[in-house]
Image: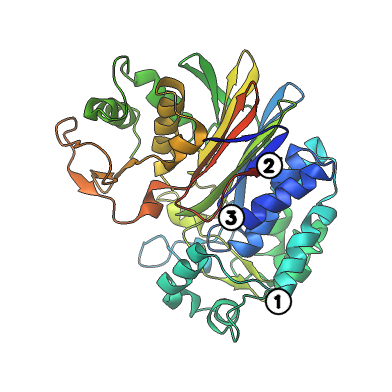
Amino acid sequence: MPRLFENAAVCSPLTLASEEGRRVLQAGGNVVDAAVATNLMLAVAYPHMCGVGGDLFAIVARDGEVAGLNSSGRLPEAAQLPSDGRVPERGIGAATVPGAVAGWRALIERFGSRSLEELAEPAARLAEEGYRPAPGLERAIERLRDLLGRDPGTTEVFLTRSDGRIRMPDLSRTLRHLDGFYEGVVAHNAPAPCTPDDFASHRAEWVEPMRGHFAGVEVCEMPPNSRGHLVLAALARLESLAGLTPDDAEWHGRLIRACVAAGLAGDTIHLVVADANGDAVSLTQSLYMGFGSGVMVPDTGVILHNRGAYLSPDEYRGGARPTHTLSPALALRDGAPTIVFGTMGGEAQVQIHVQLLARMLVGGDPPDSAVAAPRWVLAEGAVLVDPELPDLRGVTDLPVRPLPSPDIAGHAHAIQFHPDGLLAGSDPRADGVPVGY
């Protein structure tokens, strides 16, 4: 049976974080308070995929208003392309100014009812007291041991655990002083070419989501520099799915062709929160690749992301703002939210949005079935497929290969408004289950 909650629901890749969002809601906070609290807990307990040093995009539907937030940073003004002409993939040369803290602050100031200090305290306490890592984090530590071993801060936190617990006392102090994030220790201790002026100049930006129609709803996606708007281009090119189901190869063939026609070819988290009042938050926050740049700012516990690696050599220059794969989304029916959804998965995020919408709005799947269903991903010039999918070799000209890892298919989450409450689904590929009340 689908998970149905009468009053409110929270979905994220880690149950521990979602439970903090639920606690905030039950204590009288609203959906924005809960989303920020959930993200803060993920920043501590899921640090391979998101964190204080990452970027943030969100779409909020509250009190009849729909607003988008872009808090993504730029390369430091002093950044220069290395002499070999290659854009750095890791290290400080790949880091842009982190936008997450400014994003949390903007969300709370416009829509929240709690202070950022109050919402950050449980995450700060967890960082101080320590926790046993979830399976996904443990796998990431093993997979990226060489990267973590290059930086003294990440080495100490993740590779020298005497009792298996992760403790981050420096991050705990940072979380208790977020109001001074862009002027304080993080800004002053970030390695060159970062400067305090680079941090001080960052601003979160409120934007108007782009909208398109599909299967009786209005889909809201983020405009550039997010790639979310490409979902709308794919949906506009999608051939009718009438008479087909996800068990048919042609169903997937039509979705694939639409994504290719729209020009669609890391490690990120997505979370969704909704309540029975019709308010909802779709929030995506990322370090880009696992553990981002691999650089921990001394004495802060903050791992800087590596979004600069997404730039081309021609784009790489001081002050450049990279394109983002982060794509929070929601769908409206008659002007009110009907589905709030999103995923991690790098460039595959846009493709996963198209698959989720098709399954839920055309196939009739509830959120839990839609996010757990087998998926395909366009990557490496091929269609990478879950083994449970029908044979797709006859419906695309691209090579068809098996997915090398379930994580490549993203961690999707969705909440659907229902006459009896809220239907919620968290991706079983991650470490979370839907929570609510």
Query: Would residue 225 be visible to someone looking at this image?
Result: no
Residue 383 x, y percent position in the rendering: 25, 42
Instruction: Locate residue 400: give its quadrant.
Output: top left
The quadrant holding residue 418 is top right
Q: CA distance from mark 3 to mark 2?
A: 14 Å
Rendered view: 248 above or below 409: above
Other-residue count near label 1 (Cα within 10 Å), few / some / many at <14 / 14–19 / ≥20: some
| Dot 1 amino acid type | Asp
Residue at 67% across, 76% down: 167
Residue at 71% x, 25% y is 278
Label at residue 14: 3
Q: Position of residue 239 (x, y in %)?
A: 30, 17
Apparent side of residue 186 relative to residue 77 in the rendered image (left or right): right
Q: Amino acid at mark 2?
A: Gly
Q: Residue at x 73, y 45 (%)?
A: 34
Label 1 vs label 3, nearer the camera? 3
Look at mark 2 in the image and give the residue it sits on.
436
Q: Position of residue 101 (x, y in %)?
A: 71, 53
Callout 2 crowding tier (Cα within 10 Å): few <14, some 14–19, many ≥20: many
Task: Kindly indicate whether the residue at mark 2 contacts the one at mark 3 (C-beta within 8 angstroms).
Answer: no
Marks 1 & 2, CB-CB < 8 Å contact: no
Q: Residue at x 67, y 71 (%)?
A: 301
Q: Which mark is residue 299?
A: 1
State the separation of the CA atoms marked 1 and 2. 36 Å
- What secondary structure is found at the residue carrying circle 3? loop
220 displayed left or right of 352: right
